[in-house]
Amino acid sequence: MNHRHQRALRKGKWKYLKVDEHEYLFDITADARERANLAHRNPELFNLLREEWLAWNKTVPAIPEDATVSLGFSQKDMPQR
């Protein structure tokens, strides 16, 4: 998914997340609702996960400019009010 420039990487109990220009580090076993950003308390781990995401992202082919999405249904298939 490419919406609001999101990034996410999970490693064990840790999750790195970036939404727009905001970056986060969560311990998802202790904080399932992802409310406590631990990036400043764990800067080395935060930077490691960010770098791992960047390295992975370099291996992913770019989305072609002419790419389209087919939803498999039309507007008439959607519930109407």
Image (tube, helix red, strand yellow):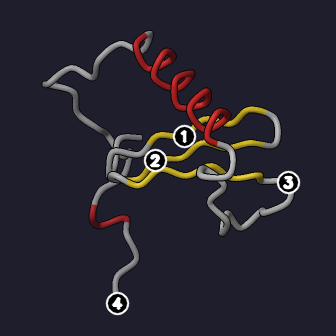
- Distance of mark 2 from mark 1, alpha carbons? 6 Å
- Distance of mark 3 from mark 4, alpha carbons? 40 Å
Residue type marked 2:
Lys
- Distance of mark 2 from mark 4, alpha carbons? 35 Å
For residue 29, the mark is 3
Q: Nearer the viewer, residue 76 or 28?
A: 28
Horizontally, residue 48 falls left or right of residue 11, namely left
Asked if 70 appears above or below 26 in the picture, the reply is above
Answer whether labels 2 and 1 touch (C-beta < 8 Å). Answer: yes
Residue, far left: 66
Image quadrant containing the C terminus: bottom left
- Give how far across and how far down residue 24 sits, in percent: 55, 52
Residue type marked 4:
Arg
Category of crowding for the residue at label 2, using alpha-carbon neighbours closer than 10 angstroms: few (below 14), some (14–19), many (at least 20): some
Asked if 73 appears above or below 58 in the picture, the reply is below
- Distance of mark 3 from mark 2, alpha carbons? 19 Å
- Give how far across and how far down residue 37 sits, in percent: 62, 60
Q: How many dots with numbers?
A: 4
* Secondary structure of the residue carrying numbered label 4: loop
Residue type marked 1:
Ala
The residue tagged 2 is 18
Pick whichever of labels 3 and 4 is earlier in the sequence.
3
Pick whichever of labels 2 and 1 is earlier in the sequence.
1
Category of crowding for the residue at label 3, using alpha-carbon neighbours closer than 10 angstroms: few (below 14), some (14–19), many (at least 20): few
Category of crowding for the residue at label 1, using alpha-carbon neighbours closer than 10 angstroms: few (below 14), some (14–19), many (at least 20): some
Residue at point 68% right, 44% down?
42
Residue 2 sits in quarter:
top left
